Amino acid sequence: MFPISRRAALAGLGASLAAPAIVNAQAPAKTSVGVLRLSSSGPVFVAAERGYWRDLGLDVELKYFTAAQQVPVAVTSNDAEFGVTGLTAAFYNLAGRGALKIVASQARDEKGFPLTAYMATNAAYERGLRSPKDYAGKRIGITTTGSTFHYMLGLIARKYNFDINGVTLVPLQTLPNMQAAFKGGQIDGILAPVTLARALEADGSGKILAWAGDETPWQLGALFTSPRAIDTRRNVVERFIAGYVRGAADFHAAFNLRDAAGKEIYGTNYAETLSLVARAVQQPTELVAQGLPYIDPQGRLDVGDIYAQVAFWQQANLVTREVNARDVIDLSFVRGHMNVPRG
């Protein structure tokens, strides 16, 4: 199923959001959002640059971080009121203690959107590592235990019916470390962001086997805040999400349209929006264009996958059994969330 058209996205935008209260003529309410300089944070950059929050009576400060785990910690410690980043085991442990609530989506790994690659070194490829299903029994480099890469390995293991405990996970902490270990043959494969994956394949260091979105689509990231903000500043939360979703709709309209054959269509304001995102992430436009993620134009979550993530981390003993997926999500701000479990 291909993403909806720009006209449908914009028509549904007003219906998808719980309408924020009317903004009066008072001074803008100050708030802040923690982000990484990644294209998956694109809705934040678009909303800020195009004044969508200003139009809603908000003065939003963007606070930049260098690692995903720093963002939920910032929200928990009041260094930022909102956060946008990938979902990890550490995030769910904080949320499970009542510190965080997911309120809208960020990026999803979707079919046709190359974002994260399963890769094999040349030596491992020659020994028969030709597909992600061959990761069983191999040494695979990831950033950290409990990371998004870790979960993607879990999805592949489930799809191809092998035990993830039979994979030797090699936590290498940083992407440069992963690159060095891959080139040095210290591991058999890695999961790599698209720009790194294509660079490694281009210089002959290894092979891209598949893309995570094509193999196992999933809810990669989310917009979240604290229960305290929801309880005491709900009007600010509503307005922030409304501006964020306007940014998401613009991002989707520019980058996420595909024709019937699945080929990318340059959408509305493609070049201008690409330049905007490139400035924010401080990378050349041609590099950013290689790894533009799928962003739902209405901020809707794949709620079922949130439940699956919590269950996976609990089975891996990385999230406590007391955490209930239902309690870490607030579905009241955006309408039409997908795959919502019953009961």
Image (tube, rainbow, N blue to C red):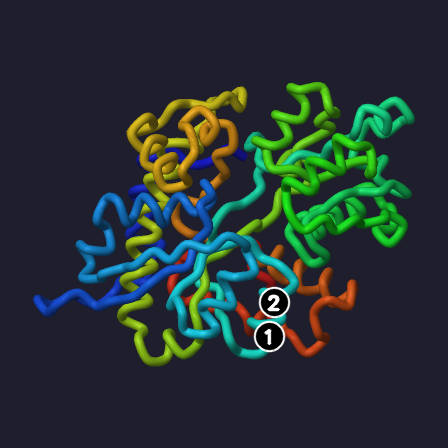
- Residue at 75% x, 43% y: name it: 141
Label 2, label 1: how far apart the Cα atoms are: 6 Å
- Residue at 56% x, 71% y: name it: 95
Quadrant of the rendering where the C terminus is positioned: bottom right
The answer to whether 336 appears left or right of 190 in the picture is left
What's the amino acid at mark 1?
Gly
Based on the displayed image, in which of its 4 quarters is residue 114 positioned? top right
- Image location (x, y in percent) of residue 153: 74, 46
Q: Does the residue at mark 2 contact the one at mark 1 (Cβ under 8 Å)? A: yes
- Residue at 62% x, 26% y: name it: 198
Judge whether residue 337 can be spotted in this image.
no
- Image location (x, y in percent) of residue 139: 84, 42
Quadrant of the rendering where the N terminus is positioned: top right
Taking depth in this image into account, of 187 and 212 the one nearest to the observer is 187
What's the amino acid at mark 2?
Tyr
> Which residue corresponds to mark 1?
96
- Residue at 57% x, 38% y: name it: 110
Vertical position of residue 314 compared to residue 64: above or below: below
* Dot label at residue 317: none
Taking depth in this image into account, of 301 and 202 the one nearest to the observer is 202
Vertical position of residue 336 compared to residue 25: above or below: above
The answer to whether 201 appears left or right of 302 in the picture is right
Taking depth in this image into account, of 129 and 340 the one nearest to the observer is 129
> Which residue corresponds to mark 2?
92
Q: In terms of secondary structure, where does tag 2 sit?
A: helix
Q: In terms of secondary structure, where does tag 1 sit?
A: helix
> Badge 1: few (under 14), some or many (20 or more) residues near its Cα, within 10 Å?
many
